[in-house]
Image (cartoon, rainbow, N blue to C red):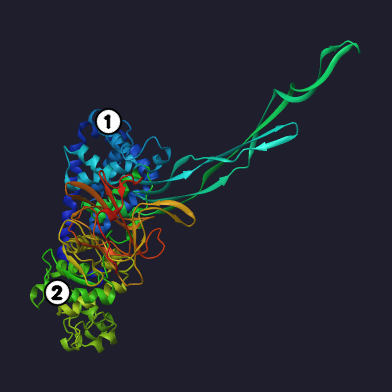
Amino acid sequence: MGIPQNQDPQQQEQQENSAVKLGKNFAKKKVKQAGKKAAKKVAKKAAALAKKALSAGLKALAKLLVSLVGTIGVPTILTVAGIILLIVIIMFVYSSFFGSGTDLKGEDQELYEYMIKELDKTIDTSRPEQAQYRIPPELLAAVVQSDFMMKEYEGKEKELIRKMAQALKPTFEYEDFNEYTEIYTETCEEGKCSKTKVKKKDHYVKKITYVDAWNGNATYEYDGKLSDWEGTLSTHNETRYKMEKVKFYKNWDEERGYFDPYWAWVPVPHEVKIETYDYSRKMTFEQTTVQQTEDYSTFDSILNQYGFSERDKKMVEALYEFSGGSIGYTEWLSGSGFGFSGGGFQGTVIPGGNVPAQFMEFYRKGEKAFGVDWYTLAAIHFVETSFSDSQNPSNVSVVGAIGPVQFMPLTWLGWSASADFGGTRLGNASIPTSVLTDPSKIKKYGGYGLDGNDDGKADPWSVADSMYSAASYLAKNGYGSDKRKAIYAYNHAEWYIDKVLKYAEMFHLAATYQPGEGMPSIPVGEIMAPATGRISTNYGWDTLNGKKRFHYGLDIGLGGRGNVPVVAFADGTVKKAYLSGSYGNCIIITHNIGGQPIDSLYAHLQNRNVVTGQKVKKGTFLGYMGNTGQSFGAHLHFELHKGSGWNAAKSNSFNPLEMVQIPSS
């Protein structure tokens, strides 16, 4: 480790030979798979494809070659240039034609139609707004074909397409917006007007508010607008009767010669003009902004489950871009780490996965001091020397790297010491042990060696000192922001990064985490509380920022405490562990409790200590309470969903207090 030239030459030669063999076998295999029909297609369209590859797929080709260079080196690339060109042509044919459904027949056409059918199942096709978030068929084709390369899914293509489509399907969140209408009527007759009371007619409309897709998330915001009153006039005449005093005559008066008059009140008909005004106004919610975040956490997590290496992931991107797609996955990957987190755990870690317990104190000390995950240090220890703890010939590489984690002596002491102890990269045999282990000399020459056990020496053969120094080295090379970059600085090979991260995740998941403080008690039975603390928001209707909403879970507050652990409330399998724009660090676990399927959801976590697909036990540490996503203060948002489990509409949710009680802190 330490500098680019330190890779074992024998190991490099083996890798290059393997790469050439792999390239030949791959090309041979793909030609065989393509059959005569595909071979003719390649021959017929090779010139056109090559031209299109140069014009539309140059970026993808460059990425592909870079990934191969990082794996097998420039000399080998030049040696197998013809093979690579053949691979590129075949990959382009497969990705372009299978992914787009162009010029397919027979089984290929059937497979393409099946893929489209499965992709349509991942969205609600009756909602046009969801269509843009459906997984592109070219991307699914690229993923599936890359998986064929690694795991040979011949005969199981449909099964793989179905699984991958479901794994990468987007999730949608909708909210009810009341686009109500208000009405009243004004009636006027003979200059007098009267109004009815205003009536409100509710009309709830579901609008999309959040999407979590394979390549990121989007938050939709709306603005409510109440229109002005608008009226319609209707006019008609009505016959109305008024009581009027009318003069009548009866009883003839002989002396006077006329009838006797008298007055009486009688109804007299009149024509009246009636004017009716029907007034109405409407509340509408219009989309104002869409905040989109490019985030491949979900995509990367799925590929990790299928065992995709860094090179395999770059292959997927190259295939997709050959077919005309656009993706920034590998750029995101270079700065995102490897998709799981869990450092800074405060409590006891019981190792699994054959990690020797006696080394845990050294791994944890490096983690605490420099923020480098203990399982990454354990993985480097294993990859370098299979957990060696003593000075022996196997701990000296052909280029002179020494100790449990294979530091170059001049990296340990400082490369400026080469002027005093040999000018070549292997000229370090003359360094006296007294100098190599002297902290003051290391400081003088600017080396990385540290005294990890406070015995006054910085010994590269000591597990305590070497692990502490390795943690420091990784931290100084940016482990906190880019794990892959830091590990690359340790060995300068992509295969090495993939191998270390593979074992790091294995060791991480195999360990048992026992929080030191704030852990809920583990009672007898199937379930337990997910955390301790005061419930700040209950399940049901409440008001947030002046708006009425339905809260589908419990909010358990941090309450001024430090790191508060969150644990699985029952045995189960992690359905999804991902970064959400609204939920932040989120974990969904599926359980079977008393024969009833139930999903539990834990949101706004500070970190995620489990991954999708992992089996967990009741009380398994999931992460610490946090303030990630759309959150106002550190807390745990905890939901329970029955039946078919969690969905974007949260139609299966129920009050968690029906099953668990939350102990106060």
The circle on residue 359 is: 2
The image shows residue 639 at horizontal and vertical percentages of 30, 54
In the picture, the quarter occupied by the C terminus is bottom left
Q: Nearer the viewer, residue 529 or 286?
A: 529
Residue furthest out toward the front: 255
Question: Is 150 drawn above or below residue 488 in the view shown?
Answer: above
Question: What is the crowding at mark 1: few (fewer than 14 residues within 10 Å), some, or many (at least 20)?
Answer: some
Q: Nearer the viewer, mark 1 or mark 2?
A: 2
Q: Position of residue 91 (x, y in %)?
A: 27, 42
* Residue located at (31% from left, 37% from top): 121
The front one of 34 and 278 is 278
The image shows residue 483, relative to residue 263, as above or below, that is below
- In the image, taking residue 657 as reference, residue 182 lies left or right, namely right
Q: Amino acid at mark 1?
A: Gln
Q: Residue at x 90, y 11 (%)?
A: 257
Q: 23 or 622: which is nearer to us?
A: 622
Which quadrant holds residue 352? bottom left
Label 2: state its secondary structure. Answer: helix
Q: Quadrant of residue 272?
A: top right
Q: Which residue is mark 1?
A: 109
Q: Which mark is residue 262?
A: none
Q: Type of residue at label 2?
A: Phe
* Label whose residue precedes the other's in the sequence (1 or 2): 1
Q: Position of residue 17 (x, y in %)?
A: 16, 55
Is residue 312 visible in the rendered structure shown here? no
Residue 206 falls left or right of residue 572 = right
Q: Residue furthest right?
A: 256
Quarter holding the N terminus is bottom left
